[in-house]
Amino acid sequence: MNAAKSPFIKKEVHCPVCNSLAQNRFIMPKSFIELEVESDRHVNKYKWMDSDFEGYHPPFYHFWHCPTCKYTASQRDFLKPGQDQQSNFNMLKRLVQQMKPNQKQIVQLLGSDINYDKVTFSMALNAHLLALYIQELPLAPDRDDNKIASYYLRTGWLIREQIAKDDPDGEFEKYKEFLNKLSKLWSGVPLSESDCLNQAAESFQLAYQNHPRYADILHATDLMILIADIYVRAGDMKAAMKSLNNVMQTGQKFRGQMGETMRKDREAGRLTATRKAQLDAQANKVNVLMEKAGDMRQEIIKVKMAKQEPKAKAVVAKLEAKGFDTEQIREKLQEFNFEPQLITRLLGAPKKKKFLGLF
């Protein structure tokens, strides 16, 4: 990394909360490209257009920060506060200005050592947690659940990256000591990537129910797939499957509504070629998402089957030793909630019952 060069554009702006001048920075447009993106939208690999900038890690600079009042948020929230859908910025501003002593202590602990000129993993994680803590100052009904979910997800990504690098210098291990102390003041502080993912999924679930963005079928189904992916990463296969089932049900309902819309438009003479193309394009996008959800469901079933198979085989052997026939064993495996596909693999397809007629 060449110290004489920088990928940043620095900008002095008035903090939207306390009005103090704060110098922040953003990365010059088109300075890097994203080479690898994981299924939960985490960028796993970047390529800088200028090799001198390879020492900079873009996620470390996502949040802007006011050194005076410690308000920390995305660049957009600094430059255009209150302009997001369902914005609660005015409430946030009031709550930051009127923080209780315990809240001020948490904010000071997280915000007293953020220096973007020599940012480290710990500083970046402080900024993420500080932005998250501020977003959670309002009571639950007044929170921006979509924003909170994205902040939890970003925080989980930072921890994942640090662990993937084998935690150089033991920085995260040291940071966990700080987190344990912080948890005595902030009981909900996430302590691990798994904590972050679970909280992200729960907050996205709330956003799905009440955020205007998800009134759109494409945004809604895409979100439910993301939620399922997050749950898979957190190890909650049951919650992941529930989310994917929701995608399939929502998609099927949409198909029915779309068919009815086309029928009515056709009867009323409104189904022009342009209108039909628009409806078909939307339906195709939903179909793609449903196919993705279907593939994810099959992958989850495979994982569950792999875990269940040893136990299922032991149950089969035990019941066979007792003289149970195949169909009796099948019934027992169904009672024990083994996956249907696993039961079929072990016992074959069930025999079709003979139709004996009416007399």
Image (cartoon, rainbow, N blue to C red):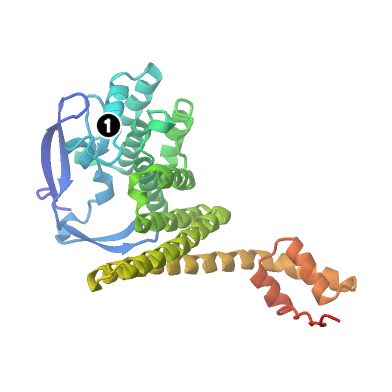
Q: Mark 1: few, some, or many residues within 10 Å (few <14, many ≥20)?
A: some
- Up-down: is 333 above or below 101? below
Residue 289 is at least partly visible in this image: no
Q: Is residue 113 left or right of residue 190?
A: left
Q: Quadrant of residue 90?
A: top left
Coordinates of residue 61 in the picture (x, y in percent): 24, 44
The residue under label 1 is: 89
Q: Quadrant of residue 99?
A: top left
Q: Quadrant of residue 16?
A: top left
Residue 162 is at least partly visible in this image: yes
Identify the residue shown where x is 35% and y is 70%: 284
What's the residue type where badge 1 is placed? Phe
Judge by depth and name the residue closer to the eye, 12 or 278: 278
Q: Is residue 29 left or right of residue 191?
A: left
Coordinates of residue 83 in the picture (x, y in percent): 22, 38
Q: Is residue 325 left or right of residue 152?
A: right
- Up-down: is 298 above or below 164? below
